[in-house]
Amino acid sequence: MPADAQAIWMTGMRQITVRAEELPTLAADAVAITALHSAISHGTEMLVYRGQVPPDLALDLPTLAGSFGFPIKYGYALVGEVTACGAAVSSHQVGDQVFVLHPHQTHLQVPAAQAKRIPAGIAPSTAVFAANMETAINIVHDLRPALGDVVVVVGLGVVGLLVTWLLARQQLTSVIGVDPVPLRRALAQQLGAAVVCAPSDAAAVVAVASQGRGADGVVEVSGNPAALAGAVAVAGFEAQVVVASWYGTKAVTLDLGSHFHRSRIRLRASQVGHLAPDLLPRWDYARRMDVVWRLLAQFPADILISHQYHFSDAAQAYALVDGGGADVIQVVLDYAERNRDV
């Protein structure tokens, strides 16, 4: 078990540094993990990278370090292999592959309860989508579509594509995917969207698909504040718009005095840290995680991984995501060489 690790820190706006970190003695209830892959979040993590998060906002995961005012160690989609177990750990064993809500780091130690064992048959590169799949499940739970609904997904990044796939699996729900990037629209069709279109065509496409009624439900997951107005515009009477984007410090301008008001449209925030209230009598986070693994076992995750970088080239990986290229879907960091060297 190594005595230290290498970790990615954001030391300022759009500044990435790899720092050495000394690892403590392994606690009795903890496991030591060697990283295999980690995924860069193209939404929340990019807000942090660009300095678009309130600097005094509290960190919401115990594995994060620093502050949103920089420097900060941030990330929440890491897959690794257990290399040692504390004396009191009976839930894990050496060799287990696990998913952890943890920043990008070559070696780490966490309480065993925070290391989610990856079921057999799910590749480590697929498991990096666990947090995003959990988010997508929560969005669908908050939307609660009915059979026969026309649902619009605005924003076809990774979470939007996962939501599209989940909704399309319901078969009697018609999913319209909206995004300006042709590759993302093509992926949405592969994942079951009935129709895809650019934002400029959304109103006409939804009118045809809904026979003029407007969408029964809309999910806004683009991360673009301007897209929320378009999401409201295509919603039908008494429809619900689920806002799954986190805009950080970006301002949102929204007309609430016309279509929104007269159509009695409901705006609903969806955030993965909390379960839908009406599900709480029957659902907990463990049940949701079980569903994540069952779904990932069937999900064609490889089509979403557009780029892979070695951990030591993380600065290039972040710059690529920040550039917003049309061919960038999900960027994953690989740790294999670095872990052999440390």
Image (tube, rainbow, N blue to C red):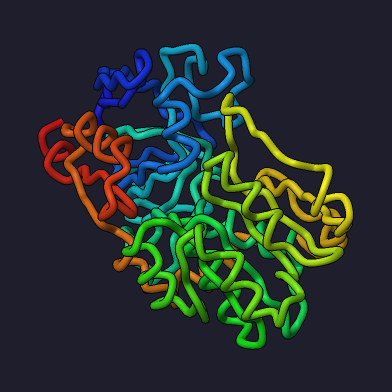
Q: Judge by depth and name the residue closer to the eye, 161 or 332.
A: 161
Q: Is residue 123 visible?
A: yes
Q: Position of residue 4 (x, y in %)?
A: 27, 23
Q: Judge by depth and name the residue closer to the eye, 82 or 86.
A: 82
Q: Judge by depth and name the residue closer to the eye, 48 or 229.
A: 229
Query: Image point 21% across, 50% down: which residue?
Result: 308
Query: Image point 38% across, 38% down: which residue?
Result: 32
Q: Position of residue 139 (x, y in %)?
A: 66, 58
Q: Is residue 113 left or right of residue 321?
A: right
The mark tally for this picture is 0
Q: Position of residue 69 (x, y in %)?
A: 50, 12
Q: Is residue 172 left or right of residue 144?
A: left
Image-quadrant location for residue 77: top left
Q: Is residue 27 left or right of residue 249?
A: left
Quarter of the picture holding the N terminus = top left
Query: Image point 27% across, 26% down: which residue?
Result: 5
Query: Image point 57% across, 28% down: which residue?
Result: 250
Q: Is residue 287 visible?
A: no
Q: Position of residue 99 (x, y in %)?
A: 44, 51
Q: Is residue 133 above or below residue 63?
A: below
Quarter of the picture holding the C terminus = top left
Q: Is residue 342 above or below residue 225?
A: above
